Amino acid sequence: MLRSSRNWTQIEKNKVTNNGKASVWVYKGEELARYGFGDGHPFGSDRHEVFHNELARAGLGDVVHYASPRRASVDELALFHSPDYINFVSKKSQEGSGFLDAGDTPAFPGIFEIASDVVGTTLAAVDAVMLGEAARAFVPIAGLHHAGREHAAGFCVFNDCGVAVEYLRHKYGLRRIAYVDIDAHHGDGVYYGFEDDPDLVFADIHEDGRYLYPGTGAAGETGKGRAAGTKLNIPLAPGAGDAEFDDAWSEVQAHIDASCPEFIIFQCGADSLEGDPITHLRFTENAHAKAARELCRLAVKHCEGRIVATGGGGYNRQNVARAWTRVVQSYAEST
């Protein structure tokens, strides 16, 4: 096991650069694009292409390094998910029909391998940052925050963020990890997966669960037992925009700053932008840019700059493209 006492200062000096600038790694490949549920389903495989087309137009070629996906092993999936659940997904993938949950997440041939590619790519991003190869990393088709340790939910088969938390602990010996989520939906799979874990610092801005799936994330949910107070849930009313986001963000920023994390995972779902077909918040992409910029600042302050972002939800394709591109731009400006 690599330990957190490693000489990270020297690793920072060794980071890959393009034209003298620290490199932002963005993951791209058919393996990621395949994660989706077919025509007519909100989570379609075209989200990957729409984002990458917009990112190409942004003119960040001197700082962005495109990296390839990889597949997670069963042992890596088992860092967060139960063996019985992993076996269930494998069996349904072979059968190629039905649902992995109550009706939101269809099974189809190969879904086990495709979902494993998402997890593996998030772990590859973690490795790139931890080993000093990348200053920042972004995985667009990832952030599947609804999947629980023993179940699928809300278009999410395996929870790559949950696996990444356990991977950082198992492989690198880190303990204090911050998870920040601005997707319109509450990150229930991460929250309940670590509800009693005092070392997983959680902050989530989302639409009030009384109006939106999954119905959780009330302000009173702050963690259990020794973890009480380490979790911050900020539900917003339908129609909330950038002004309400800014007010909520000040709480998130203070919460993360006080926790002194060793690594930050950022789930930046774009379904919180105005015009998403299945949610009711009205952020602009400025919210995503601000969150990315401020989290980079906190990462530099507390954890040698170590931060990985995942795309999360978003079902208006223009919103997905704009919001995620602004995250990468903020990454580039913060290196």
Image (spheres, grey):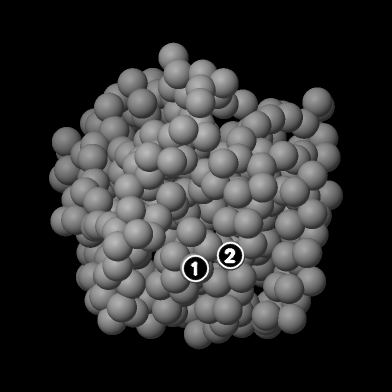
x 43%, y 35%: residue = 11
- Label 2 crowd bin: few (<14), some (14–19), many (20+), radius 10 Å: many
Q: Quarter of the image containing the N terminus?
A: top left
- Label 1 crowd bin: few (<14), some (14–19), many (20+), radius 10 Å: few
Q: x, y percentage for residue 101?
A: 42, 45
Q: Which residue is mark 2?
A: 293
Residue 271 visible in the picture:
yes
x 42%, y 79%: residue = 322
In the rendered structure, the answer to whether residue 193 lies left or right of residue 246 reads: left
Q: x, y percentage for residue 31?
A: 19, 50
Callout 1 amino acid: Glu
Judge by depth and name the residue closer to the eye, 20 or 322: 20
| Res. 102 mark | none
**Residue positioned most to the top:** 1
**Residue positioned most to the bottom:** 275
Q: x, y percentage for residue 121?
A: 31, 44
Q: Which residue is mark 1?
A: 333
State the separation of the CA atoms marked 1 and 2: 8 Å
x 19%, y 56%: residue = 29
Report which quarter residue 206 is drawn in.
bottom right
Label whose residue precedes the other's in the sequence (1 or 2): 2
Assign a secondary structure to mark 1.
helix
Report which quarter residue 290 is drawn in.
bottom right
Residue 101 visible in the picture:
no
Query: Are the residues at dot 1 and dot 2 in contact (C-beta closer than 8 Å)?
Result: yes
Q: x, y percentage for residue 246?
A: 73, 73
Assign a secondary structure to mark 2.
helix
